Image: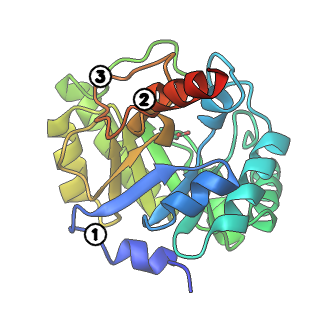
Amino acid sequence: MHKTVNDIIAKKGSKKISVVTSYDYTMATLCDQVDILLVGDSAGMVMLGYENTAPVTMDEMVLFTKAVSNARENALIVADLPNKSYENEVDAISNSERLIRAGADAVKLEGRLPNIIGAIVKAGIPVMGHLGLLPQTAKKYTVQGKTEADAEILLSDAKALQEAGVFTVVLEMVTSETTKKITETVSVPTIGIGCGPDCDGQVLVIHDMLGLFEKLKPKFVKRYLSLSEEIKKAISQYIQ
Ligand code: KIV
């Protein structure tokens, strides 16, 4: 039996909710011991070679979600609604349903969109929120919540998402002070990426943590392996 949304909510306060991104069958089988496999739209960059996540389509997300779902035995699967797939409630619900049919247990979307989130939740689909740096629309990748005013806005956004019914919130590149405040205030788990230790869980892009993606190296990422070096060495030995 795989993890459920309630299993994740029950880990609020533990600082131990583990999330990695996953896009394909083989890697998903290797990572399935985590709490959540996130079929992130970062797939657009690390799997499809796009400059950013903006061009990712629903068809692409459905394919990645199917592949991960074929591998999963343990983790909860959350799939990203890609850019422009949730501009109104009708699209948001029908696209969320497509991801659920492809094997996701829940969907994630970016920003303070309580009406859209509420509509998806009302349709019976759990939603993970995403605040702070929002890669689908960001012009620059900078740390969020630095001033008192920005921190207040983020805190109010997190409360609005909780009210709308999210079961978790991803915080991306938010200062550690603001992250701590949000984590202590909201009753749903916070999952941080580049936010420091004071979240209920952490998420990393699997290609970053394994040292597999050489084009972009976010400063906050702890690398557990240098897999790209290992692969290049192996290929070179094979050629010899
Ligand atoms: O698409 C993704 O990988 C994400 C994470 C960075 C949270 O949204």
Q: Nearer the viewer, residue 168 or 50?
A: 50
Q: Residue furthest left?
A: 177
Rendering quarter of residue 87: top right
* SS for callout 1: loop
From the viewer's perspective, is the residue at label 3 or at label 1 nearer? 3
Task: Report, in whole angstroms, how far the alpha carbon at label 2 lies from the one at label 1.
Answer: 22 Å
Q: Nearer the viewer, residue 112 or 10?
A: 10
Residue 215 is left or right of residue 53, and the answer is: left
Residue 58 screen position, x and y as percent? 80, 43
Residue 29 is left or right of residue 130, and the answer is: right
Q: Amino acid at mark 1?
A: Lys
Residue 100 vertical placement versus 152 (above, below): below
Of the two numbered discs 3 and 1 on the same chain, state the one appearing first in sequence: 1
Of the two numbered discs 2 and 1 on the same chain, state the one appearing first in sequence: 1
Q: How many labels sit on residues?
A: 3
Q: Residue furthest bottom?
A: 1
Q: Residue sitting at 21 percent across and 67 percent down?
A: 13
| Res. 104 visible in picture | no
The residue carrying mark 3 is 219
Residue 209 screen position, x and y as percent? 39, 38
Which labelled disc corresponds to residue 12? 1
Q: Is mark 2 within 8 Å of ligand 1?
A: no
Residue 138 screen position, x and y as percent? 52, 20
| Res. 31 visible in picture | yes
Residue 35 screen position, x and y as percent? 43, 67
Rendering quarter of residue 2: bottom right
Q: Residue sitting at 53 percent across and 59 percent down?
A: 30
Q: Nearer the viewer, residue 234 or 228?
A: 234
For label 1, count other residues whose C-alpha is less than 10 Å away and answer few (under 14), some (14-19) or many (20+).
many
The residue carrying mark 2 is 133
